[in-house]
Image: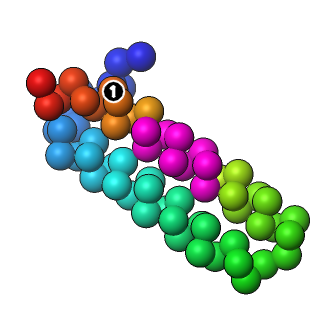
Amino acid sequence: MTIPSPELSCDDWRRICDALRYLGRDLHHRSFAVTDERRALLWQEMDQCLELADRLAGEAGECSG
């Protein structure tokens, strides 16, 4: 898979990945104040955010050389 938007710089891709990881951590923290059912949904979303960040970081690794 290629990076879909060539007008984004390497720094932009790094910021996107960092934001997705931050969102994942935020969802994890929020999960402690909700019901078990809601917690499972938040953890699923957290996992998806972190997986996407890792995938994008791997693809953006082309920027670093």
Q: Quadrant of residue 3?
A: top left
The picture places residue 7, in percent across and down from the top left corner, at 20, 33
Q: Quadrant of residue 63?
A: top left
Q: Nearer the viewer, residue 23 or 28?
A: 28
Q: Which residues are magenta?
A: 46-54
Residue at 35% across / 30% down in the picture? 58
Residue at 70% across / 51% down in the picture? 44
Give the quadrant of the C terminus: top left
Chosen colour scheme: rainbow
Q: Is residue 14 above or below residue 25?
A: above
- Report the residue marked by disc 1: 59
Q: Is residue 21 above or below residue 34?
A: above
Question: What secondary structure prevails in the magenta region?
Answer: helix
Residue at 61% across / 49% down in the picture? 47
Looking at the image, residue 1 sits to the left or right of residue 35; the answer is left
Q: Is residue 56 above or below residue 20?
A: above
Residue extending farthest left: 65
Residue at 73% across / 83% down in the picture? 33
Pointer 1 local density, CA inside 10 Å: few below 14, some 14–19, many at least 20: some
The picture places residue 12, in percent across and down from the top left corner, at 23, 46
- The residue tagged with tag 1: helix, strand or loop? helix
Q: Is residue 28 magenta?
A: no
Give the quadrant of the N terminus: top left
Q: Amino acid at mark 1?
A: Glu
Looking at the image, residue 36 sits to the left or right of residue 60; the answer is right
Q: Is residue 18 above or below residue 9?
A: below
